[in-house]
Image (cartoon, helix red, strand yellow):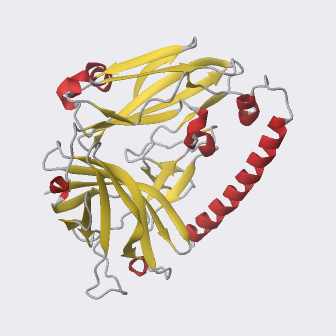
Amino acid sequence: MKILNKIYSNIIMTLVLAIMLIIGAFMTSCEDEDKNNLNDFLATGGFVRFADQSPPTEVGVDDVSNLNYSFSVEDPNGSTESYELKLYADLSGTRTDTVQVSTVTSFPHSFSFTQEDLASLLGVSADNINFGDSFFFTATATTVDGLVYGGAENLNFDQVFPQPDGTYLDEDDFLVTVGPNDEIFTTADGNTFLVGGQNVSNTLLAEGGYRQAFEFNFIILCPPPASVTDLVGTWQITFDPFGTFVDDGVFEIIAGPGDNQVTAIDIFDHPNPDESGGIYYVIIDLDPATGAVTVERQAAWHCDNFGCPYGEGRIDGTGFLFNCVGNGLMKFNFEHTVDAGSFGTLPMDMVKL
C-alpha cells in the first residue's frame, strides 16, 4: 500500500508541476526579458550553477593518471555568500566518507581535479583511483540572508533506519537529518533509504537545463573498444538496493540475438508464469565505442514474488560495461515498473565471474 500511495502521489505531483510550469512559461513570456527567472523559480534565490556547461558524467581516459575533471561555477542571482563543496566516492565498490573540498566566497570560481587531487582529498593513495570508480559531489549555498540551499549528503539511496519516535539513524547509529525536500523511500523488501536534497526541489536537481551545481557526479570509463565477447559468461549481482534478485544473484549472459546484443538469462531468478520453463530473457544492447549498455523496457521478474498482484515486473535502464576491471564489471541504473506504476530508479552492480 505504501508503494501504491507513493505512485499515486508521484502522479499528482507530476500533474501539479506540469500546471505550474505552463503557468510559469506564460508569465515569463509577458515579462521583461532581463528579469531573473531563476530567482522566480527559487523564490529566495539561493542558487549556484555551472558557468558554461555542466561537466561530463562520464570521463574516458587511456590511463587514470591522465584524469582531469574540471568545471566552473557562478552565482547567477548575486545572492550567494558562500558555496561549500564536498566529495565522496565509490572506489572498487567501497563507499568512502564524505570529505570537504573547499568553500568558495567569490564567483565565478573554477575547479580542477586530477587523480592525485582526488586521492589526496579522499585520503587514499593514487593507485586506489581506478577505472569504474564513481565520484559524487554535493554542495550547499548560503545566501546573504543566511538561508542554506543544497544537495543531499549522499546520492545513491543511503540506507537509514526508522526509530519508534519517528526519527532515523544511519548505519553508525547517528541521527539523520531529513530536509524539507528529502524523501524516505521504502523498497519492496522493507529497506528504507533517504533521497532528496536540502531546500532545492528535485525538479531543479534533475533538470539539466538549469546547470545546477548542487549534486553531480562522474565515472571513469575503460578505454575502448568493448565487445560482445566481454559480456558473454557467468555474472553475479553484487549490489541491488531494490532487492529484486534471489539466491546468490548468479546468472548467464549469451551472445545475440543481434549484433552488439547479448541476452541475460533469468537475471533475477524469478519464475515467469507466462513462458514455458519459467525463464525471463533480458536483452542488453552494447555500444562498443563507449562501453555503454542499454536495456529497453521489458519483463524481467514476477511481482507475485513480492506478494503484490500486479503481474510482471519490467525494467529499463542504462549503464556501462567496464571490461578493464577484473573479469568485467557492469553498473546499471534500472527503473522497475509494474502495471500500477513505477517503483523508481535504483542502481545495480554486477561482476563477471
Look at the image and tell me whether residue 208 can be seen. Answer: yes
The x, y position of residue 292, in whole percent, is 32, 48
204, 28: nearer the viewer: 28
Look at the image and tell me whether residue 97 can be seen. Answer: no
Residue at the (63%, 60%) spot, across then down:
10
Residue at the (21%, 42%) spot, across then down:
225
Residue 190: image quadrant is bottom left
Residue at the (43%, 73%) spot, across then down:
313
Relative placement, left or right, of 294 versus 166 is left
Image quadrant containing the N terminus: bottom right
Q: Total of numbered circles in the picture? A: 0
90, 168: nearer the viewer: 90
Image quadrant containing the C terminus: bottom left
Placement of 199 over or under 321, stated as above or below: above
Placement of 319 over or under 69, stated as above or below: below
Relative placement, left or right, of 192 versus 227 is right
